[in-house]
Image (tube, rainbow, N blue to C red):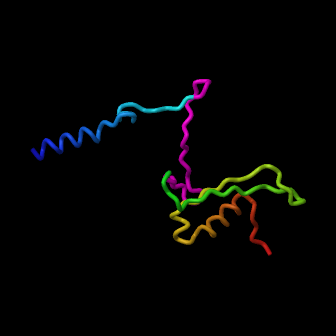
Amino acid sequence: LAQAIVDIGQRRAAYRPGRPTPNTRATMQNEEGRIVDLYLPRKCSATNRLIPAKEHGAVQLNVGQVDENGRYTGEFYTFALAGFIRSRGESDACLNRLLHEKGLLTFSK
């Protein structure tokens, strides 16, 4: 009897009405027929690790370009930092390195 209950529970867990079965894949298409997804995974700019969708410690920063008068030009650079880097306390150093590589930060006096 116990084995029969386990089998029924496994079948119920495998099939849920309204959800796609494991063999089908849901895709989003626009009017032109191109496949578009709602979720695009991000990568950490410092470590190139994938940032999971459920990671709440990750941040994404947009750093704007300014002209010689200090006015925003409409262009920006996007940096994503994983919670792994932030929890180790290295986000400041990593962001300084990334900004220096883009030429947005100089270390000269």
In the image, taking residue 14 as reference, residue 56 lies left or right, namely right
Q: Would you say 104 lies left or right of 13 here?
A: right
Residue 43 appears at what percent x and percent y?
A: 55, 52
The residue lying furthest to the left in this view is: 1
Please identify the residue farthest to the top as the structure is shown: 32
Q: Is residue 17 left or right of residue 5?
A: right
Image point 33% across, 37% down: which residue? 16
Which residues make up the magenta segment?
30-52
Furthest toward the right, the residue is 69
Residue 35 in magenta stretch: yes
Q: Is residue 57 magenta?
A: no
For the N terminus, give its image quadrant.
Answer: top left
Residue found 74% across the figure and 71% down from its top: 107
Q: How many marks?
A: 0
Give the camera-side residue of 103 and 12: 12
Q: Residue at x 55, y 44 (%)?
A: 40
Which residue occupies the foreground of this view, 108 or 105?
105
Left or right, residue 17 beside residue 55: left
Vertical order, 41 against 27 (above or below): below
Which residue is drawn at the image coordinates 20% and 40% (left, top)? 8
Q: Main secondary structure of the magenta part?
A: loop
The C terminus lies in quadrant = bottom right
Vertical position of residue 4 compared to residue 23: above or below: below
Classify residue 95 by image quadrant.
bottom right
Residue 103: x percent and y percent?
Answer: 75, 60
User: Where residue 38 sits in the image (x, y, percent)?
Assistant: 55, 40
Residue 15: image quadrant is: top left
Residue 87 percent location from the top left of the image: 52, 69
Residue nearer the viewer, 48 or 39: 39
Q: Residue 6's image quarter?
A: top left
